[in-house]
Amino acid sequence: MFLEHREKEENKRQATAGYDLTDAYAQISYCLPGEPCPKTISLQADQEQYLIPALLGRYIDQDLWVYGPKAQAAAATGEVFLADGLLTKAAHQEMVEVGGQNYSSVALLSLFLKRTMSLLAPIVRPERLQALVFSVPEVSVPILSAVTDAVGMLGLKNASLFLIGRAESFFYYNICQPEELWKQDVLLCDFSGTFLHTLLFTANRKTSPVACFVEEADWKEVAAGREDLDQCFLETMKALIGDRNVSCVYLIGEGFLGEWYQESLRFLCQERRVFLGNNLYSKGACYAARQRMTPGSVSEGYVFLGKDMLKANISLYAEKRGQDSCQPLLDAGTNWYDAKAEIDFLLEEENRFSLRITPLNGGEIRDVEIALTGLPQRPALTTRIHLQIDMADLTTLRLNMEDFGFGEFFPATHQFWEKTISIGQPDTAAGSSTAAQASAGADTTDTATVASEQSAAGADAKSAAPPVLAES
């Protein structure tokens, strides 16, 4: 998800960073120019102490703040007032009481980010940071707003900032590994909470680009503290994997400390590679930052279709430089609330245009023809239409069209049309040429008609001539 973009120096190789953030912990990975793989910040130079407790503490006897393990230790001895749950509270825009004083939850989150980012400063100066991607358990509009506002207080003038979910972070981590590790399905077992959470990566290699999915599940019966935890975990793994071809398994989280899962491990290691660690999400976010700044052949050949992401490519069927073509508008793999585009084109005499909907999840390609009613009679290619397109929700395409005319020869009427189209199921107006129009006596806003809708494979050879893209 795109949060904010600022100007950056062209042709200058800069560093990227990934920041995994939850209410419990934070973790930071970075990648310097020329290095193939990210590295993760450790709280101890000689140890793999990657998890930073997501805590702030204000000393009882002075206005001094500490964070992370120092806040945790000081709270245990009663030296500080503790502030926790920073991400959730900031998402809810709560005021937080710390030692009898109220603080903005967004300001507290920003303070925590500032302190933790200081760990990165000796390695990567802020002015060298080209992109910073935050990974969170689940993306939502309140989380987006909270992180945007908190990061905005940090003054990262040159960095492009993004927010993604952990499932997308897992996707980026996978596609940046050697291909033999993810040539089949990949399973991630996350035991960082009180019960097991799994993410299963799959890819539909019959589409171009390859459509990738991550299926998430909670297994509350696989809970810390059970005496038969190994057996319970083993049965869950057998049920989850079943007949699937899983080539690689990742075990992450503090729940996998110790040797309690020996029987389960023997099963998982049967013709599979198994890895143990706890910095996958921040590394995945760092890979995402690098791929977004300098896309490579891997990222261009694969698209992640998460649960909040557009599952189809949307394009305008038009003529460009004398050739019929499909002009891309919205790309599959974009979060639906980020998907938007604008384009100008010139209508032929029929006053209609077509959109092509190309699903990447196995659905049928559809052509939807939109008729714009009420336009004055003009010669072909003398009506300039300005189209704005976005998503009303995950499966509803929203179109706004406006008549811009053709300069002084055919002045603009600024007549306005609105239309929504379902891209999850065929539109209810499909095949109808008599869809309802705006009520008489209304202003210049009309409801555009769905003139026809059909499978692209069965397109009518007598359909209207395509519009011509207007040169900017």
Image (cartoon, rainbow, N blue to C red):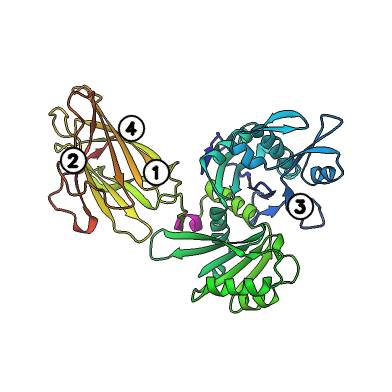
Classify 318 as above or below 65.
below
Between the C-alphas of marks 4 and 2, the distance is 33 Å
In the drawing, does residue 470 fall left or right of residue 6?
A: left
Q: Which residues are magenta?
A: 297-302
Closer to us: 167 or 471: 167
Amino acid type at mark 2: Ala
Residue extending furthest top?
408
Label 3: element kind: loop
Which residue in the structure is indicated by mark 3? 42
Amino acid under disc 1: Asp
The mark closer to the camera, 1 or 4, is: 1
Closer to the chain start, of discs 4 and 3, is 3
SS category of the residue bearing label 2: loop
| Residue depicted at 22% across the width and 24% down the height | 442
In the picture, measured across the screen, residue 149 lies left or right of residue 102, that is left
The residue that appears at 65% across and 78% down in the rendered structure is 266
Q: Which residue is mark 2?
A: 435
Instruction: Find the distance from the CA under tag 4 to the CA under tag 3.
Output: 50 Å
Secondary structure beneath label 1: strand
Report the amino acid beneath label 4. Ser
Are dots 3 and 1 in contact, CB under 8 Å? Answer: no
Question: Residue 67: x percent and y percent?
Answer: 77, 41
Q: CA distance from mark 1 to mark 4?
A: 30 Å
Q: Earlier in the sequence, mark 1 or mark 4?
A: 1
Return the residue at label 1.
393
Residue 300 picture location, percent across and down: 46, 55
